Each structure stands twice: as C-alpha cells, then as structure tokens.
Image (cartoon, grey):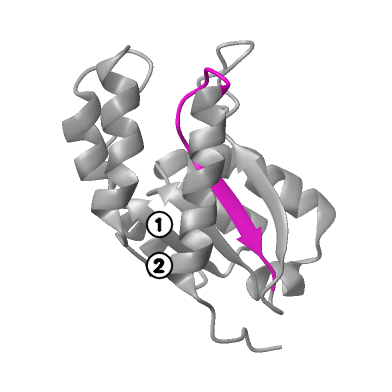
C-alpha cells in the first residue's frame, strides 16, 4: 500500500513531545514514533539511557528493535519513523535492518554536536544518516532536518543543565 500524504510537521511534533516527556523523566531528550502505511501512530519510544545508563538505548534503536519484532517487512517498508533528532549511525543501521521505509527527523546530528559539545553522555558522531543509509542495498527515504530550530530548544535546555 502506498503511504498516504502524511503531515510530517504534525508527526514530528509528536516525536518532540515524546522527547520532552523523556527529558521530564530524567533521561536524554530524544523521542520517536512509528507511523504505519495508513497514517496511524503504532509505536512511540523515548530514549532508554536510564535506569541502567545504557549508551545504546537510543530511542530509534529501541523502536527499530520493537518494530522488527511486532511487524512484518512489508508493513515496515510502508512505515515512517519520525524522530526528534537525526538518527546516529547505530540508529540508522537499526532502522535499515528493521526494514523501515522512511525517516523524518528534526535536529541534525551536526547541530546536535554543536549543542552537546564533548559531553560524555552524548559523544555525537556527526555522521549524516543519509551517508549510512546510502551504503545499503535498499532505499530508505530520508527527510530532514525539519523544524530544526524547534527541535533544538529541548536540547539547548537539557544539555545546559548537565
């Protein structure tokens, strides 16, 4: 099934809300949602750094794992991952391996690195997800950065307090 005309700004702002909720719980301010081919939100995930200080607990990686267990490949090919920040190399790879067909992100990795600097809890790779995904054997559509200034606000607040 071809995906409907999606309101990217609407769904991206939902991912921002998940990131805000995650930050309010004390974890890193990253959030994402998965929208199926019919335009329904079928999954949400905030950063899972806490409680175990899991440096691989990125929202997108955890969601990709959950999605690959819950949905069949054709469903994921029609799905869109909306994420508050550009997926890092690990998360882009996880989305690729899960079979997710499209990624829409807010804050770029480059700008995130400018905000976080060399913070030990967020050693940003500053590697565009497009670069990672372009090396794969199937196409993953990437849209972003989008609403980047809006996406940056939560990170500017959060990392200034760390």
Q: Mark 1 near mark 2, Cβ–Cβ under 8 Å? A: yes
Residue drawn 46% across the image and 71% down it: 8
Assign the N terminus to one quadrant of the image.
bottom right
Q: Is residue 117 above or below residue 95?
A: above
Task: Tell me where residue 81 sits by quadrant.
Answer: bottom right
Q: Where in the figure is residue 150, as x and y percent of width and height?
A: 30, 50
Q: Is residue 14 left or right of residue 1?
A: left
Closer to the observer: label 1 or label 2?
A: 1
Q: Which residue is mark 2?
A: 142
For residue 70, which numbered disc appears in the image? none
> In the rendered image, which quarter contains the C terminus?
top left
Q: From what the image shows, is residue 153 above or below residue 160?
A: below
| Residue 41 in sight in this render | yes
Magenta stretch holds residue 141: no
Percent x, y for residue 57? 57, 28
Local crowd size for mark 2, using a 10 Å CA cut-off: few (<14), some (14–19), many (≥20): some
Q: Report which residue position mark 1 lands on.
A: 105
Which segment is the magenta one? 25-36
Q: Is residue 21 left or right of residue 28?
A: right
In the image, 5: left or right of 131? right
Residue 49 in the image, given as x and y percentages of width and height: 55, 21
């Amino acid at each position: 099934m071809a995906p409907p005309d999606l309101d990217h700004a609407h769904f991206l702002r939902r991912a921002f809300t998940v990131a805000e909720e995650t930050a309010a719980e004390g974890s890193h301010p990253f959030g994402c949602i998965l929208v199926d081919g019919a335009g329904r939100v079928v999954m949400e995930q905030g950063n899972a750094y806490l409680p175990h200080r899991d440096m691989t607990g990125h929202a997108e990686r955890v969601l990709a794992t959950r999605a690959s267990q819950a949905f069949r490949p054709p469903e994921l090919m029609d799905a869109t991952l909306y994420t508050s920040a550009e997926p890092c190399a690990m998360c882009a790879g996880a989305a690729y391996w899960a079979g997710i067909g499209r990624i829409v992100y807010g804050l770029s990795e480059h700008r995130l690195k400018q905000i976080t600097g060399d913070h030990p809890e967020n050693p940003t790779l500053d590697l565009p997800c497009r670069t990672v995904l372009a090396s794969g054997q199937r196409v993953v559509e990437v849209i972003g950065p989008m609403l980047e200034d809006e996406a940056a606000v939560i990170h500017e607040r959060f990392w200034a307090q760390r």
